[in-house]
C-alpha cells in the first residue's frame, strides 16, 4: 500500500493532468509488485503538444508541492513522457502510444487509487 506522501503527490499530479485536458487519468498502487515506485499515474493526450503541456503541468504542480523530478524523459519525441519522482512515476502517453503499450494491463490486478474523490477532500 502506498504511503500518504506518495498518494498525495499522485493525486496532485493526476489532478494537474486532468486540469490540462489529459484523458483517462488513472492512479495505480504498484508498490506491492515493483520496487522502483509506489504509485504510477497514467494519462493520455490527443496530440504531441498536449503531451508536453500535461507533462509540464505535472512537473510544475509537483514543484509547488515541494517535489522535483529525479528524471524526465521523452520530451524529444512526445510520444511517451515519463516523469520520475522516485516514489511516484507519471506516464503521459500520446493516445496511440498508450493503446500500443497498454501499461495498465500489466497492473490490472493492483488497486486503483480513486484520485478524483481524494482530490476533492479538504486538506
Image (cartoon, rainbow, N blue to C red):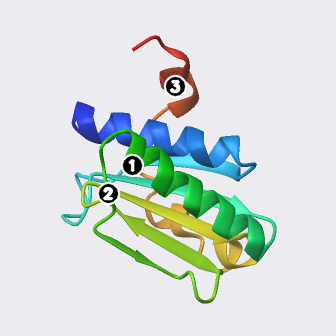
Proximity of marks 2 and 1: CB atoms separated by less than 8 Å: yes
Residue 1 in sight here:
no
Farthest residue in the right direction?
Answer: 46
Badge nearest the viewer, 2 or 3:
2
Task: Give the x, y percent position of residue 72.
Answer: 41, 74
Label 3 CA crowd tier, 10 Å (few <14, some 14–19, many 20+): some
Numbered circle sitting on residue 63: 1
N-terminal of the pair, mark 2 or mark 1, is 1
The residue pinned by badge 2 equals: 68
Q: In x, y percent, where is residue 67?
A: 30, 49
Above or below — where is 48 with respect to 62?
A: below
Q: How many neighbours does mark 1 have within 10 angstroms: few (below 14), some (14-19), or many (20 or more)?
A: few
Q: Mark 3 against mark 1, which lies toward the viewer?
A: 1
Residue under the image location 48 percent in, 23 percent down: 118
In the rendered structure, find residue 119 and report the number of the disc placed on it.
3
Which of the two discs, 3 and 1, labels the residue nearer the N terminus? 1
Where, quadrant-wise, is the N terminus in this rendering? top left
CA gap, disc 3 and disc 1: 17 Å
In percent of width and height, residue 83 lies at 43, 66
**Residue at x 80%, y 72% (from the top left corner):** 47
How far is mark 2 from mark 1, CA to CA?
6 Å
- Looking at the image, residue 71 sits to the left or right of residue 34; the answer is right
Give SS at disc 2: loop
Alpha-carbon span between mark 2 and mark 3: 20 Å
Q: Is residue 32 visible?
A: yes
State which quarter of the image contains the C terminus.
top left
Amino acid at each position: 500500500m502506498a504511503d500518504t506522501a506518495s498518494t498525495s503527490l499522485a493525486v496532485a499530479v493526476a489532478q494537474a493532468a486532468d486540469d490540462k485536458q489529459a484523458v483517462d487519468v488513472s492512479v495505480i498502487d504498484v508498490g506491492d509488485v515493483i520496487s522502483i515506485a509506489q504509485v504510477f499515474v497514467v494519462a493520455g493526450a490527443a496530440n504531441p503538444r498536449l503531451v508536453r503541456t500535461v507533462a509540464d503541468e505535472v512537473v510544475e504542480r509537483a514543484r509547488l508541492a515541494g517535489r522535483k523530478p529525479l528524471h524526465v524523459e521523452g520530451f524529444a519525441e512526445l510520444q511517451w513522457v515519463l516523469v520520475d519522482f522516485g516514489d511516484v512515476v507519471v506516464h503521459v502517453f500520446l493516445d496511440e502510444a498508450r493503446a500500443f503499450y497498454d501499461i495498465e494491463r500489466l497492473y490490472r490486478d493492483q488497486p486503483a487509487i480513486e484520485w478524483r474523490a481524494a482530490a476533492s477532500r479538504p486538506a
